[in-house]
Structure formats: C-alpha cells, structure tokens
Image (tube, helix red, strand yellow):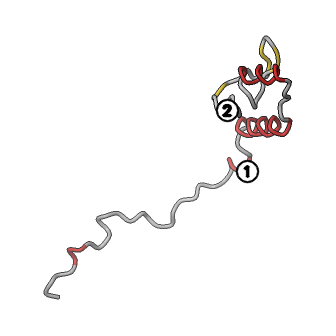
Amino acid sequence: MRSVFVCRECALHYLPPESLEYSDGPASPVWCSVCRQRAATLGVSEPAAARALALLGAARTARPPAEEERRRPDVRPSRPARTRRSSPGPGTRSRLG
C-alpha cells in the first residue's frame, strides 16, 4: 500500500513514486514537486526532521498489523443489545394506577 503525502507549503496531496525518485531528481515526502523546485531555486534545504517523520508515518501505515493484533480473540458483549421492543415504554403505566 502506498502513502499519499501532503505538501507542507501548498497543502497539495500527491503520490510520489515508491522509490522517491523522479526522472529529474529525488522526490520529497515533505514538498510536492513544484514546491521542491521552488525551494531548490531559493537554496532552501528540506527539513530533515520533517522528512524523517513523513517517512516514518508512511512506513507505519504500509506495514501489516502486528501478530498479536491478529491473534486477539473476538470480544462480544455478554448480553444482547436492548431493542426498542424489550424496553419498557410509556404505555406500561396507566393513568389510573
């Protein structure tokens, strides 16, 4: 499963290649290609902490569920849910009582 990233500059949602490599250079999990080119033109480097967090989040969503989560027993309620028919309604009392 591939992750969709959100550009931190323009809030655009984008899907970089899995290898994080475009034909014209490296892809960024922090910036879209337009903002990445603009930052490169201005000489601004990508924040390393933001890149690490974006890649960690993408790796966390891509991995399968943990073994212990798959073996967790099915927990069901101890009694059936109350329905409208089983609950006492306003018609159970009379005005004369």
Q: Position of residue 54 (x, y in %)?
A: 76, 36
Nearer to me, 50 or 63: 50
- Which residue has dot 2 on it? 6
**Image quadrant in which the C terminus is located:** bottom left
Image vertical order of residue 57 relative to residue 77, above or below: above
Within the image, what quadrant is residue 89 found in?
bottom left
Relative image position of residue 41 (x, y in whole percent): 81, 19
Mark 2 and mark 1 in contact? Answer it, CB < 8 Å.
no
Q: Amino acid at mark 1?
A: Glu
Three-letter amino acid code of the residue under disc 2: Val
Q: Quadrant of residue 51?
A: top right
Q: Quadrant of the N terminus?
A: top right
Q: Earlier in the sequence, mark 2 or mark 1?
A: 2
Q: Is residue 75 left or right of residue 21?
A: left
**Residue 11 falls left or right of residue 37:** left
Q: Is residue 59 left or right of residue 48?
A: left
Numbered disc in front, either 2 or 1: 2
Q: Position of residue 50 (x, y in %)?
A: 80, 38
Does residue 2 lie above or below 94 as drawn? Answer: above
- Picture residue at 38% right of the left edge, 65% below the top: 82
Q: Residues within 10 Å of mark 1 (few under 14, many from 20)?
A: few
Residue bearing mark 1: 68
Q: Residue furthest left?
A: 96
The residue that appears at 63% across and 55% down in the rendered structure is 73
Between 14 and 11, the one lying in front of the other is 11
